[in-house]
Amino acid sequence: MNQSSFFCPQCAQMKLFQQPTMNHTPHILASVFLCGVWLPFWILMAMMDNAPWRCSFCGFTDEAKYLHAPRLREYERLAAAEKARFSEQARAERGEVTFQESLAYFISDNQKALISVGVAAGILGLLIVFAAIAARSPQTAPVNVASKPAKTDEVAINTRRAFAQLAQAKYEKEYPGFTFSTTGVDEQTLTITSKTINTNFTKQFRKMDNLSQLNKIGFTYVRLRHGKADEVISLDRLATENK
């Protein structure tokens, strides 16, 4: 149990606040029975644990950051409202946009979020793999892991998967019939499938200015699939042609 003094809004004076600590017993048992596979989840949950503080006199509860700065909640509300207003204004200024333009805006607006999701998913995957290897491998002799090349870049693959999933979630209502997926070696090909894709669509897609952002995420090809026919676009070659 953590204890500290904060200003209590209900008591209108400084009072003793208490914060319950995380119960590690079930995580210890889970780690033992699952041979260490639960360790990364336990570590992440311990890092993210942020139980609210409770006034020992009146029972008022709140997060520590709001107890330190009572006006912070109002500031966050105003900041969120202002951000929403700017986003709405930006959408209004864009007006009616085509699918290609909407996809370009989506890539540029969410690049940092996509990379963050991919990095987090990659780290979590590596922790799970390392925990499983450590639990199964004997400890009598050291294993020279550094001499073995990595098969895939987990962080980059998860970043590309996250982009395809976010794009699918965004466009399945706005443009029904479009599906996004990752294929190929190390999932470096972004496959867009729709019956409405035609020659004109492909020409407009090639002229998009933000296709270089796909290359930064790690995609090397874009496959436009329409029915049984499809066309594969090399992003590296397209960047050279557009110079």
Image (cartoon, rainbow, N blue to C red):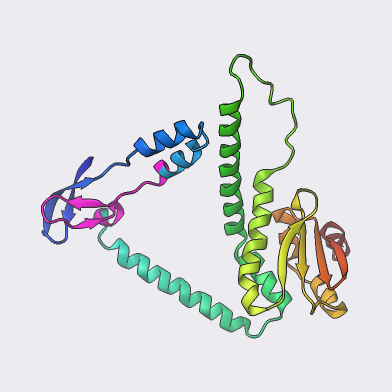
**Residue 215, x across and y down, in percent:** 75, 57
Residue ID at (36%, 69%): 77
Taking the magenta stretch, the answer to whether it contains residue 63 is yes
Which quarter of the rendering shows the N terminus? top left
Residue farthest along the bottom direction in this orientation: 96
**Residue 36, x across and y down, in percent:** 50, 32
Residue ID at (71%, 80%): 98
In the picture shown, does residue 156 fall above or below 101? above
In the picture shown, does residue 97 fall above or below 66? below
Which quarter of the rendering shows the C terminus? bottom right
In the picture shown, does residue 40 fall above or below 105? above
In the picture shown, does residue 211 fall above or below 23? below
**Residue 214, x across and y down, in percent:** 73, 60
191 sits to left or right of 34? right
148 sits to left or right of 39? right
Q: Nearer the viewer, residue 242 or 150?
A: 150
Taking the magenta stretch, the answer to whether it contains residue 207 is no
Residue numbers of the magenta segment: 46-67
Q: Nearer the viewer, residue 215 or 197?
A: 197
The quadrant holding residue 136 is top right
Residue ID at (82%, 69%): 225
**Residue 165, x across and y down, in percent:** 64, 62
Residue farthest along the front direction in this orientation: 33
The quadrant holding residue 175 is bottom right
The quadrant holding residue 174 is bottom right
11 sits to left or right of 201? left
